[in-house]
Structure formats: structure tokens, C-alpha cells
Image (cartoon, grey):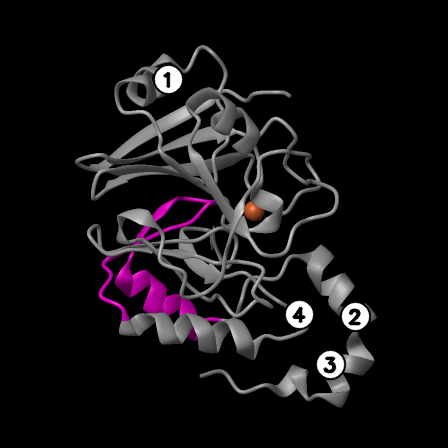
Amino acid sequence: MLRGRLEEVIDLGAGFWIWRVRHPYWKPSDDWDPVVTTTVVKSRGEVFVIDPIAPDDAAKIVWERLDVDPPTQLVVVKPDHVRDVDWFADRYGATAWGPGLVDPTDIPSTRLSPIYPGTELPGGIVALNAGRWGVETPLWLPDQQTLVFADALTERNGGLRIWSTPWDEAGPRHALGRLLRLPFKWVIISHGFPVHGRQAYVRALKWDPWMSDELKEWAQTIEPYRKLLGLQNWPTE
Ligand SMILES: [Fe+2]
């Protein structure tokens, strides 16, 4: 297992912080920034590490903090964010949670208790629906008034954006709109600048989703399907 360099630690509140690591398997052709985010939150006595990616041994600040307040719960928010959950499960003996669907190319050896939209985890944390076939279950941290996403949203040129789902642009927009019913002030994402406010989220729902050239190319391959279902002309909400 390769481990990346720690780039940044950001404190967000008591027992609430993120670390950002240069992803060791990132390739220049990837449509995301090489520095990715892991979130730590202490909620009602439980210490969560969300989408855990392990920095290298030089990241003393991370390892020392985790040794002082060891993780009790690990969450994988999306099948391709398994990352280093095995490493953290072995090191801390924490309970691990993850998607009901797994990525066949990245199956962890740790047993993940499945989470679905509506699952309440210890600490009062609630799994949500991002409208992407249920493959991503963002989390609501009620005490921190924060939503934590994997890839449903991304940041490009300073703006928070929905990350395109070419086979169903309206579904994610609708599901993400529903989340405005929750009292949250902050949004954390994995790819791009990690912390955004509620207003940025509202703006993201109005903007066109982010679609890379590669994704646009792929969307062409399902053009007959998109045409049949009128997906090209799907009204923005
Ligand atoms: Fe991702």
C-alpha cells in the first residue's frame, strides 16, 4: 500500500478537522485534484474518520491526534472511496461502515456494515441520498451542521459544482435539493477545495453540473439513451 504526503490539516471545531493527502495513485489523466480529503469528527463520544486515506509517517500531526483520540467508527461514503479503510480498521479496531454496493476492483478485507440513505450511525450521524443510484451516501453531521460528500459535488475554479451523472442529470439535482431541508451551514467535499458554505451549495444546484471532456465523450456513447429519455433537455430546477 502506498501512502501519500500530507498537504494540509484544517481545524473546523472541537474534535472536528480534516486532513488532505496527495493521493498516491493519482494519474495526470484523472479529472480531479491529486490532493484529497479525509474528515474527522467527534460526535456524541464517537470518533469518526470519513473516507480515510492514510498519510505517510511524516504526517506526525495526524497520527498524534488520532493516537490521543482514536477513531471508533470508519465510514466509506462511496464504493470507490474504500481507500485505506483496512489500514485504519487494523490499527484502531474501529467499526467500519460502507456502501451496500461495492466496487469489484476494490473490495476491502474489513467487513463494512452496509449503510443506506436513512441509516443512523452511532453518534447521531445520518446517511443521506445523493441521487446517484444510491452509490454515494453522504453524511449529515447534525451537531456540526455539516454535510460530508464523496463525489456528488466537486470544486472547480473556486466554485462548488454538482459532479455530472450523464445518465441522470436531474436525479442528483433533485436529491441534493431535498437536502436543503436539513439544517446545515457547511459542506465538505473530497475533491477540490474542501469546505464550502450553504450559499455555495445553493448556487451549485443552479449551475450546470461539472462535466469533464472525458465525461462528455462518454456521455456521447449513451446519446441514444439520453435522446430517448429527453435527458439533453432536462429542465434545470
Ligand atoms: Fe472520489
Name the residue: 17% across, 35% down: 14
**Contact between labelled residues 1 and 2, with CB atoms less than 8 Å apart:** no
**Contact between labelled residues 3 and 4, with CB atoms less than 8 Å apart:** yes
Residue for badge 4: 166
Magenta span contains residue 127: no
Magenta range is 182-207
From the image, state whether disc 2 or disc 1 is nearer to you.
1
Q: Label 1 sits on what residue type?
A: Trp
Q: CA distance from mark 4 to mark 2?
A: 9 Å
Q: Label 4 sits on what residue type?
A: Pro
Mark on residue 220?
2
Residue for badge 1: 63
From the image, state whether disc 1 or disc 3 is nearer to you.
1
Residue for badge 3: 226
* Ligand 1 closer than 8 Å to label 3 CB: no
211 vs 69, nearest the viewer:
69
Name the residue: 48% across, 27% down: 88
Mark on residue 71?
none
Dot 1 or dot 3, earlier in sequence: 1
**Disc 1 element:** helix
Dot 2 or dot 3, earlier in sequence: 2
Dot 2 or dot 1, earlier in sequence: 1
Q: CA distance from mark 2 to mark 3?
A: 9 Å
Q: Is residue 121 something one can see in this rendering?
A: yes
Label 3 neighbour load within 10 Å: few <14, some 14-19, many 20+: some
